[in-house]
Image (tube, rainbow, N blue to C red):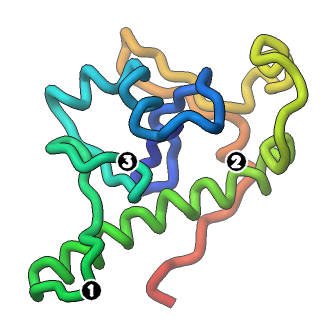
Amino acid sequence: MAVVDHDYCFRYIHVGSYGHNADGSVLQRSSLFPVLKEEGFLVGDDAFPLKPYLLKTYSSNNLSCKQDTSTYRLSRARLIVENAFGVLPYRFRVFGKPIQVKVTATEIMVTPGTLDYEYIVRGCVKPGSWSADISELPSLLR
């Protein structure tokens, strides 16, 4: 499970649940869940249960103007998340298929310095080498 922001940056990643587990239960077992319940919200898809901290689109076809606008905007936000997951296997080919190694071995596979590193105490991020390798994503307005 991952959280992506408006700039296609992965802000939170939870690894350690199997693919057949329900998304809602994976979220509840993550370290993000207690913080999310108290001071935030996410945009989710139909795999997640509707909660005060989890925004979802309306599923009915007979919507009011406000509901239709809300559904449109939430769908646009979710599109960014879907695009971020689509870019991921192109940048890191290892994500194009299931990883056939133990979780501890995957740490060895990621080259040091490639990913961003967050200095939590100082409140800053050291960009990884990946950010110099990619060009700007095309505008959605074109």
Question: Judging from the image, what secondary structure is the residue with disc 2 in?
Answer: helix
What is the number of the mark on residue 112? none
Q: Is residue 4 above or below residue 73?
A: above
Of marks 2 and 1, the one in the foreground: 1
x then y, percent, for residue 49: 31, 46
x then y, percent, for residue 128: 66, 33
Residue visible at 42% across and 24% down? 124
Q: Quadrant of residue 105?
A: top right
Within-10-Å neighbours for mark 3: few <14, some 14–19, many 20+: some
Q: CA distance from mark 2 to mark 1?
A: 44 Å
Q: Disc 1 marks which amino acid?
A: Asn
Q: CA distance from mark 1 to mark 3?
A: 20 Å
According to the picture, the residue beneath numbered tag 3 turns out to be 48
Question: Judging from the image, what secondary structure is the residue with disc 1 in?
Answer: loop
Q: Quadrant of residue 39?
A: top left
Of marks 3 and 2, the one in the foreground: 3
Residue visible at 20% across and 37% down? 40
Q: Earlier in the sequence, mark 1 or mark 3?
A: 3
Question: Judging from the image, what secondary structure is the residue with disc 3 in?
Answer: loop
Residue visible at 47% across and 68% down? 79
Q: CA distance from mark 3 to mark 2?
A: 35 Å
Q: Earlier in the sequence, mark 3 or mark 2?
A: 3
According to the picture, the residue beneath numbered tag 1 turns out to be 61
Q: Between residues 72 and 49, which one lies in front from this camera angle?
A: 49
x then y, percent, for residue 20: 62, 37
What is the number of the mark on residue 132? 2
Within-10-Å neighbours for mark 2: few <14, some 14–19, many 20+: few
Q: Quadrant of residue 99?
A: top right
- Horizontal side of 104 relative to 63 (left or right) equals right
Whether the residues at callouts 1 and 3 have beta carbons within 8 Å, the answer is: no
Whether the residues at callouts 2 and 1 have beta carbons within 8 Å, the answer is: no
- Horizontal side of 83 relative to 32 (left or right) equals right
